[in-house]
Amino acid sequence: MRLVQVLIPEGAREHVLETLDDEGIDYAAFEEIGRGDFEAMVQFPVPPSGVEPVLERLTDAGIREDSYTIVLAPETVVSQRLTALIERYPGLRISREELYARAEDLAPANSTFFAFLVLSTVIATTGLLLDSAATIIGAMVVAPLMGPAISASVGTVLDDQRMAARGVRLQVVGLLAAIATGAVMGWLLQFTILIPPDLDILTVPQIVERTNPNFLSLFLALGSGLAGAISIMRGSGSTLVGVAIAVALIPPAATAGLGLAFGPFGVAVGASVLVLVNLLAINLSALVLFYLAGFRPLDADQVEGVRRSVVSRIAVIAVGIVVLSVVLGAVTWTTFQTESYAAQAQNEIQQEFDRVDAEGVELVSVEVAYEPVDLVLGNEPEVDVLIGIPRDVQAPPDLAQRLDDHLTEQLGRDVVVRMGFVEAEVSESEPPDPPFGRVAESSPTSLADRRLTTVAT
């Protein structure tokens, strides 16, 4: 429920009160003893969805734009007379005036916005380098990106070019500032003892996760934008939804900055594409939802211009998303291909060993090194196979080459097979461990310390 307070200009009192009577609204009117431009103040309760149509009727009755209208959200309204009013104005959508006010409140002053943005980026960059999801989530609580994303869409549908331009400007400049902050922080940390020397950021899972954008990231951004618009329209959960919007933007922006600082150009490019796609998707979903919800300017002469502006902006954003979706589609397809190859290669090698059934010979592990970039560049997959074999058993001859030929024939792609053999002895004491259980926990790259014999093709 909303409590609306309106100052009635001189000469409009009778028309205003008649309008409220026609609407079936209970009201209280008070004499105005202020500066003399107004003759009375009237206040009345009305459901949130009824504020906009009632104010439009009052405007026709003589409430000028230079008057004062205050819309309050009371904690509780106790009355049995509200049922008919609620039935007359069903729905949960807030008024145009409330939407505009909330959009302005969500876009803070520039100094406040950039202070929180830089701090959230610093926290997110720290979380990325620490591979700490909890720290990254904490950064999202600080990030102030929901306000500009919402105000840009609200300004567009309500024909406030100043608000729309400021929302777009804060988003673009803010994300560039976030990338720059991540780059500067990453560059400075390389001269300290806070991170390992010669750190390869591609070994950090939280960073790698944001360097290969696919279509799932697009769903995240679209969902965040819709959630933000709904939370503003319904007046609930805007703070938590702001976290969802920040999740889609700040971590990949910080990742792009780290890519610039540490050198892998592909990291910066992949994360930047993710930032741009998410930014466009959030704005698109919010803009479409606000327009479909029926928000329009008060002046009817502006409605047609707003419709053209909304359509043109939706078209531009959609084209941008389609163009960037080529990158998303390529990453999604190459990731599917490489992961499918890895799973098939592991399965084929396991089946081959099951067929051989050599006594005492055990397949310990199979690791396939094949990334999307390898598929694009035409690099051959690398398959590392670790074989456990008793000391008194002869290793099968040419096993690496046989597996190479088998994989090439079955999967239709040239491959490099590296094979390591580890000798093991198992005591007869009770209870025995699995013959190669402890060895299976090691990766092929760490087996050099075990003095293995390696056969490569």
Image (cartoon, helix red, strand yellow):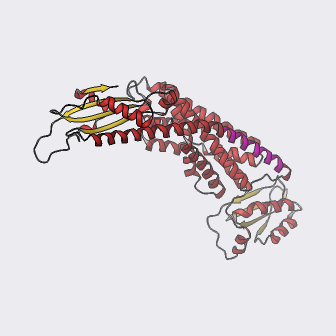
- Name the spot of residue 249 as percent of width and height, x first: 56, 40
From the viewer's perspective, tell me whether residue 347 is left or right of residue 253. left
Name above or below for residue 381 compared with residue 295.
above
Q: Of all residues shown, which one is farthest toward the bottom?
A: 80
Instruction: Please state, as top left, top right, bottom left or bottom right, where the N terminus lies in the image.
Output: bottom right
From the viewer's perspective, tell me whether residue 37 is left or right of residue 274. right
Q: Which residues are magenta?
A: 302-321
218 or 77: nearer the viewer: 218
Number of marks present in the image shown: 0
Name above or below for residue 94 compared with residue 125.
below
From the viewer's perspective, tell me whether residue 285 is left or right of residue 363. right
- Name the spot of residue 187 as percent of width and height, x first: 48, 25
Residue at 67% from the left image edge and 62% from the top image edge: 92
- Report if residue 307 lies within the magenta region: yes
- Name the spot of residue 37 as percent of width and height, x first: 85, 56
Instruction: Please state, as top left, top right, bottom left or bottom right, where the C terminus lies in the image.
Output: top left
30 or 279: nearer the viewer: 279
396 or 37: nearer the viewer: 396
- Report if residue 445 lies within the magenta region: no
Residue at 16% from the left image edge and 32% from the top image edge: 391
